[in-house]
Amino acid sequence: MKLLLDLGNTRLKWALCEGADWRARGAVGWDSDIAAALREAWRELPTPAEATGASVVDAAREATVAAAVHACWPLDTFWLRTPAEACGVRNAYDEPQRLGVDRFLAMVAAYAAGHAPCILAGVGTALTLDALAADGRHLGGLIAPGPQLMQQALVGATVRVRPERPGEVLDAAANTADAVASGCWQAAAALIERFARRMGPALGGAPALRLGGGDAAALLPLLELPAALAEDGVLHGLAVWANAHPAATRAL
């Protein structure tokens, strides 16, 4: 049994899995007492054989989570750093470790599930895009602000753009709140569609488009291309990697 940890910018997601079965799972926001929340969530769980994490946050938060794991069970946490190649996926970055491990694991999950060739969009604090070929080659990607971060940046950098309420996403807005929301969310959708169209020839036609991340469900209806949600892609990819690399074969 394995404890899997996905440390994202907004929250931590975890799962306890045994083979292909998910025994338990949960999520905790960074704005909470993370150590206390994890102790409570894990209090009655069986003891896992190993703990494996993927992180895009700072070392201090990694240490807090590792300490919470150790407080519950006699386990050290192994933190996966982005490799050049693993589980059939080949990283396109010149410096492989600079590709976010969340993006790499989302590709591992998609490839293992038979979804390649595909475009993977991570819609969260950042909007990430990656092209994955049928043979597991990563063809590269893009990073932009996520739609909510776009809105925050716009409001923070202007004097008169001060929405007094959350806006609706419309084709054309008649007030500031709706104009800000519509512009930012439509910009995110347009970038995804443009990337998918531009990468289509290299991927052999019209690749599948898969969306993950906390804002994926909200963005999905705005897309004019066929797309599907890919929930918990990092955890699924981490499970594939952990099953392929047993704890006895890796160093902490």
Image (spheres, rainbow, N blue to C red):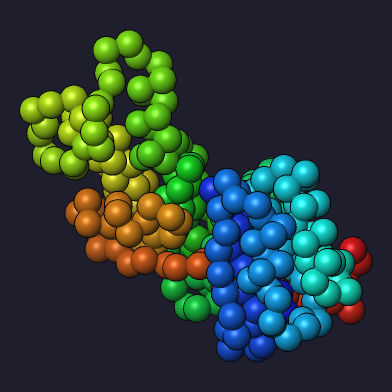
* Residue at 65% in and 88% down: 19
Relative to 37, 77 lies left or right? right
* Residue at 64% in and 61% down: 37
Q: Is residue 28 visible?
A: yes
- Quarter in which the N terminus is drawn: bottom right
Relative to 118, 228 lies left or right? left
Relative to 37, 197 lies left or right? left
Residue 212 drawn at (x, y percent): 43, 60
The quadrant holding residue 59 is: top right
- Quarter in which the C terminus is drawn: bottom right
Give above or below for 144 relative to 28: above
* Residue at 35% in and 31% down: 151
Residue 191 drawn at (x, y percent): 33, 41
Query: Which residue is more in the foreground, 61 or 135?
Result: 61
Residue 202 drawn at (x, y percent): 42, 55
Residue 9 drawn at (x, y percent): 57, 46
Q: Is residue 244 visible?
A: no
Query: Which residue is more in the foreground, 88 or 54?
Result: 54
Give above or below for 38 relative to 139: below
Give above or below for 93 relative to 159: below
Q: Residue furthest top?
A: 159
Number of on-image labels:
0
The quadrant holding residue 90 is: bottom right
